[in-house]
Amino acid sequence: MSDINPNDVDELAHAIAGSLGGAASIAVTYPLVTITTNLQTKENEGKPKLETIKEIYDKNGVSGYFWGLESAVYGMATTNFVYYYFYEWCAKTARTFTTKQYLSTWESILASTIAGSMTAIASNPIWVANTRMTVTKSSHSTVRTIVDIVKKDGPLTLLNGLKPALVLVSNPIIQYTVYEQLKNVVLKLQKRKVLSPSWAFLLGAIGKLAATGTTYPYITLKTRMHLMQHDKNHKQSMWALIVEIVRRDGISGLYNGVGVKLVQSIMTAAFLFFFKEGFIQWSLKVIKLLRVISMNRNKKHLSG
């Protein structure tokens, strides 16, 4: 299959490819998500990881590792669609002013910041629902869970964890900046315009390793806050929660499940970039086909 110029691929094609890639990657690695979420939300009981894994299996069997998968797929699809749309829109805008094919480090950071902020706001309700479905082993649909949360705890509960989520905008900034800069190096060395899926897998893993390793405490905070009810008795600021965790569990409490999370995040990111690079040309062809069909319909309408 021939290479395509990245400047010819619009933000919608990237958004569709990213959305499909995100859904596929989370489906492949979801059991690790379940294990990590349980490790993050449990009180410090001194249980080793293997015991937590066994406990999930003993209570719910293999299906226990897939509680909340539906909402996670929705969440990843939404997250990546919004992120890639705004990231590529910002990147395209930057390239029109700089006339360069590749973004600089600072341009990548700015594009990631804007895209990450929009993504955090748009997808937070879905991730609140996903956390609750995973921990409570709910069999309800994502929409039903969101409706139940609103009825029981109020609509503002869907914004729980938004502050650490906005802080975690730094996660994709680190991830995509590392990825994009390494990608630029590889493309220049190979004298190609498009990265192969295998290279995307490797560079995606490296980028996610750097990002998750530096931002994990905020991932823990976001997960804990997703489980809080939005009322005066449960309302707690991000910094108060940090103090509470450190006092009770020590600094290590902010890193519960970090090993499993690193494996899960790296694998999810690697598969995401692998699938996205594979889907991008398909997405571009579909969009071009739809545009041709739309143009033909308009011509027929005008001629009629």
Image: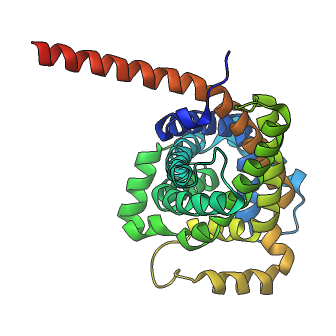
- Which percent across, then down, holds residue 71? 53, 45
Q: Is residue 213 left or right of residue 234?
A: right
- Which percent across, then down, holds residue 73? 57, 40
Q: Give whichever of 240, 295 is nearer the camera.
A: 295
* Residue at image coords 51%, 20%: 285
- In the rendered image, the residue lying farthest to the front is 99
Name above or below for residue 173 compared with residue 92. below
* Residue at image coords 64%, 87%: 240
Quadrant containing the N terminus is top right
Q: Is residue 274 left or right of residue 116?
A: right
Q: Is residue 222 left or right of residue 186?
A: left
Q: Give whichever of 88, 205 is nearer the camera.
A: 88
* Residue at image coords 41%, 70%: 156
Could one spot residue 270 in this view of the protein? yes
Q: Give whichever of 56, 39 is nearer the camera.
A: 39
- Which percent across, then down, holds residue 283? 53, 26
- Which percent across, then down, holds residue 226? 57, 65
Could one spot residue 257 in this view of the protein? no
Q: Quadrant of residue 257?
A: bottom right
* Residue at image coords 62%, 26%: 4
- In the rendered image, the residue lying farthest to the left is 304
Q: How is the image coloured?
A: rainbow
Name above or below for residue 284 compared with residue 77. above
